Image (cartoon, grey):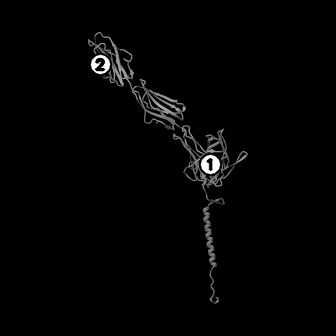
Amino acid sequence: MITFVATANHSLANDTNISVGVIRVNVSYTETNFDNVTFNLLNSSNANINGTKFNGSTNRAINFSGLDDGVYRLNVTVVDTANNSNTSDQRTIRIDTTNPLVNHTTGSVINNTNLTVASIFVNYTVTETNLANITFVVSNASNGSQIFNTSTLFTTDRLFMNYTVNGDGNYTLNVTVTDTLNHRNMTVNRFVTVDLVAPVVTFSVSPVNLNPVEAVTIGSCVATDRMDPNVQGILSIKKAGQSGYTSVSAGSYTDTNAEGVYTVRCTSDDFAGNSVTLEKTFTVAGGGVSGGSSGGGGGSSSAPGPIVKKSLMRGAAELEETPVSIESSEAWDIEGSVQYAAATPGEVYSFSFVPLASDTGVAEDHSIVISNVDEEAGTVTLIIESDPQEITLSIGESKEVDLDSDGVTDLLVTLNGITDGLADVTFAKLGDWIEPKEVLSSTVEGRTIDTWVWIASGVVVLLLVVLLLVKIFSKKAVPVTVPKGRRR
């Protein structure tokens, strides 16, 4: 009988993993007529790579050294002088002296990346024969390096991980691989900034109604961002009648010769690529009234029509407001809607509307008055005229309005929000909206006759009168012959 004998570092148990390239074998056996003993070392394919035979009965131990990483099997056979033999049980030993290999690969998030999405994708490769586990760790440095996620896998079947983060932050991630001998290896830390929110910008324009050549004060475009401390705000302006924007500086702006609507734009981009644009407008018009607060964005095109002052009753006090022409907005013409992000109580918005029943195309003048802004209650009350209709909207609410009382709604009014006592409202066209058009016509006894017909008729009559007068005067001018004898 042959028995493996365990000493301090030798004769290891079956299915043992060791981290050195040496296998020490120590056995005991009992045989009176001993002849020889053979120590056999086999590789993972069961090929005998070292069979060492001893003829002395005292040879009961051996060292197999210089071995590479891999799987080995060993057994011991004892033979007596009568050629009887006995073989020990076979033991399997795994040698692993190498740390695991783990690396990021194609598709994995790049170090020092700025993301505008709430997910971080990690793709990696692992080289390890005796895998124990793979551990992923994501921590958020913005929360004191708090560990956000720890995931452990026990197989290499899936070599990727997609993390969903819960908000802005500076995240650190790594992948650690451990083998069955407790060898470990870890990727270098990768740092990722997640920025889901665009910067916030503020600026002012005052006054919003002025005469040509008068100055308007444009406040600085101030930008702030939770993740980007160096975010900047940039100002630009689109002059009345122009389609493009040019750079402009904060301060007094005096290039207001052209009448119409000017749009001032404040933009900002953070390092993650999030961008924001805030627009405010002011109107230059001859006979306009200076003053008023800055209005929200919405775009502009050609100069609006004459500014008319409208009197509105608010309780016991009468307020006079200069209407803002909705039709001066490009968005109203192109998209059929316009947004005013900073509508003040008492502000008036004017537009024209052609009733469906109209057969002349003549437009009716209408207006929308911001009657009351209640930020605490989250409501705004508006009065829509010419036939006054009062509606009250809560934040996020929309209402349809019938302008000409024909049973078909024509206008959609939406309250987007309220900030610092200013209402953010949107006006949009509904249904078969007929655009105002000019009709050159005169009406006689209830019938419409084209103006150009009257002009042509007048010219014809005038020509006939001239011809008649020429004919009359030609008859009166016939010469008279005097006899020669009577001449003097």
Residue 487, how many percent across, how many down? 64, 88
Q: Secondary structure at mark 1?
A: strand
The quarter of the picture where the N terminus appears is top left
Please, which residue is most extreme toward the right here?
Answer: 316
Task: Estimate the spatial distance between the alpha carbons at disc 2 and disc 1, rounded to whole Å.
Answer: 99 Å
Mark 1 neighbour density, 10 Å: few (under 14) some (14–19) many (20 or more): some
Mark 2 neighbour density, 10 Å: few (under 14) some (14–19) many (20 or more): few
Residue 312, how many percent across, how many down? 69, 48
Give the residue drawn at x 43%, y 36%.
Answer: 106
Residue 379, how many percent across, how many down? 65, 40
Q: Which residue is mark 2?
A: 52
Q: Which residue is mark 1?
A: 217
Mark 1: amino acid: Thr
First in sequence, mark 2 or 1: give its number.
2
Give the residue drawn at x 60%, y 63%.
Answer: 453
The image quadrant of residue 2 is top left
Give the residue drawn at x 31%, y 13%.
Answer: 58
